[in-house]
Amino acid sequence: MKVGIIGCGAIANIMTNFAVEGKLGIDLNFFYDRDIERAENLALQVDGTVVLEVEDMLDKVDLVIEAASPQAVADVVPKVLEKGKDVLIMSIGALMDKELRERLEKIASSTDSKIFAPSGAIVGLDGIKAASIGKIKEASLITRKPPKSLGIKTEGETILYEGKASDAVKEFPTNINVAAALSLACGKDVDVKIIADPSVDRNMHEVHVIGDSGEFTTITRNVRCSMNPKTSVLAAYSAIKLLKSLNENIIVGT
């Protein structure tokens, strides 16, 4: 499987490192970034190709990884799907825009392409997806992050947001993909609380779900990427595992 990536930041760096070691399970061939130097640095590691426009890779790949921004999902992903190529979306918060999500689904259906959204920086999403077959009565997320990763300074615990996920992703588009993943997995606009907490040194996500199948709570304490404290290593790993599963004969989990 030939793959191109849009956005050559922390996620792309981790994936490229796996590709160098032969552990990615796919051929990472094409790189695009508005900062061409970043794309060139990664392409050199795997003897890949830098493209000046996303369209330049579309006739040569089977799948495109979006690892740039929510805006890239709106601007670029439709072009990829229209070419009949599969897409893996890292900026899953963009899919909380119902109009955009339905537009992408319509294009994918017409071109027989697939949209993949990895579980990202939380555990337990398989269980939530299974529970959604029944009725989910309540679903909530409490996210705690070091103030620096949220772009603020504070000496004490500060609640930055409390409300629905659909509004949270608008105010914190690069920090709250977890809320979007949780909402899309359970088919419910979940309750979200975002806390800047100087006492923590990791991104933390506590998920609580109650449904007719039972009740469960998960707590994830993520190691942050050294390149970008807003990004958790687990988010990159979840995408890598999803990519590897596309070539596996035994699939474990939903």
Image: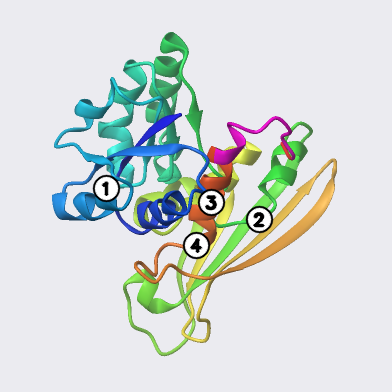
Q: Could you tell me which secondary element the residue under label 3 belongs to?
A: loop
Provide residue 155's location: percent of width, then percent of height. 41, 90
Q: Could you tell me which secondary element the residue under label 1 belongs to?
A: helix
- Residue at the spot x=36%, y=77% of the render? 148
**Residue, disc 1:** 43
Report the magenta residues as a range.
Answer: 244-252
Residue 208 located left or right of residue 149: right
Query: Compared to 52, does 167 lie above or below?
Result: below
Label placed on residue 194: none
Provide residue 61's location: percent of width, then percent of height. 35, 26
Query: Camera-side residue: 172 or 56?
Result: 56
Eye-nearest disc, 4 or 2? 4
Report if residue 250 lies within the magenta region. yes
Do the residues bearing badges 4 and 1 touch, measured as CB atoms within 8 Å? no
- Residue at the spot x=71%, y=61% of the render? 218
Do the residues bearing badges 3 and 1 touch, measured as CB atoms within 8 Å? no
Label placed on residue 233: 4
**Residue, disc 3:** 120
**Residue, disc 2:** 123
